[in-house]
Image (cartoon, rainbow, N blue to C red):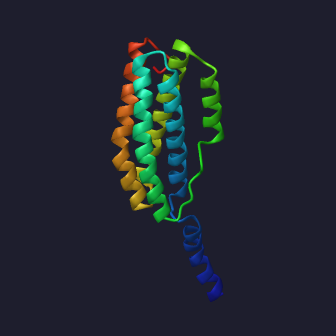
Amino acid sequence: MKALFLFALLIPQLALAANGSPDSSFYRSLAEGGMAEVDLGKLASNKAADPSVKDFGAMMVKDHSAANQELKSLAASKNVSLPDGPGVAAQAKKAKLEALSGSTFDKSYLANQIKAHQSTVTLLQTEISSGKDPDAKAFAQKVLPTVQSHLSAAEKIADSLRIKSHQ
């Protein structure tokens, strides 16, 4: 009985050792989203019709590449393995965007960016308020203002291009 009790106490520690962090899913979700932002940003900086959308795409590549590198280092220090690339849903969104051109591309890209950044803000706020890993929480606090500024920038560009789908 005593051995069973001790084993029950060890299960959370064993799970933590296997995953590296109590917030492993946060690390993985954020990494997947960040990689998708870089891919879509490259696409937008090459394909967008409006210069402000091109510039926004370039900013996504620059900012998310830097954040992805920092997240990768942090996850490695926690023994958390990250995905190699964006998830299936992000790949499908990219394929849809690749088929578009001109203002149709710009509108779809911006609508996607607004939705993605709203989701990321929620993910970061949830980690800040209820995460268990202090380093993950600190990372979320650090990047939240940048993600919020990306969301604001995407909304301003959408407004200037008279894209109403984000409201």
Task: Residue 102: give x, y in percent of width and height.
Answer: 53, 13
Q: Is residue 125 left or right of residue 89?
A: left
In-front residue for pair 153/8: 153
Classify residue 36 by image quadrant.
top right
- Look at the image and tell me in which quarter the C terminus lies: top left
Q: Quadrant of residue 80?
A: bottom right
How many numbered marks are there? 0
Residue projecting furthest to the bottom: 2
| 48 versus 1 height, above or below | above
Q: For this view, does 139 lie left or right of residue 12?
A: left
In-image side of 34 versus 151 (left or right): right
**From this viewpoint, is residue 125 visible?**
no
Is residue 75 or residue 145 the one in the foreground?
Answer: 75
User: Left of 45 or right of it: where is 18?
Assistant: right
State whether residue 71 is above or below residue 146.
below
Which residue is pictured at 48% across the width and 15% down the height?
Answer: 49
Query: Residue 24, position in %: x, y?
Result: 53, 57
Residue 99: horizontal and vertical position, in percent?
64, 21
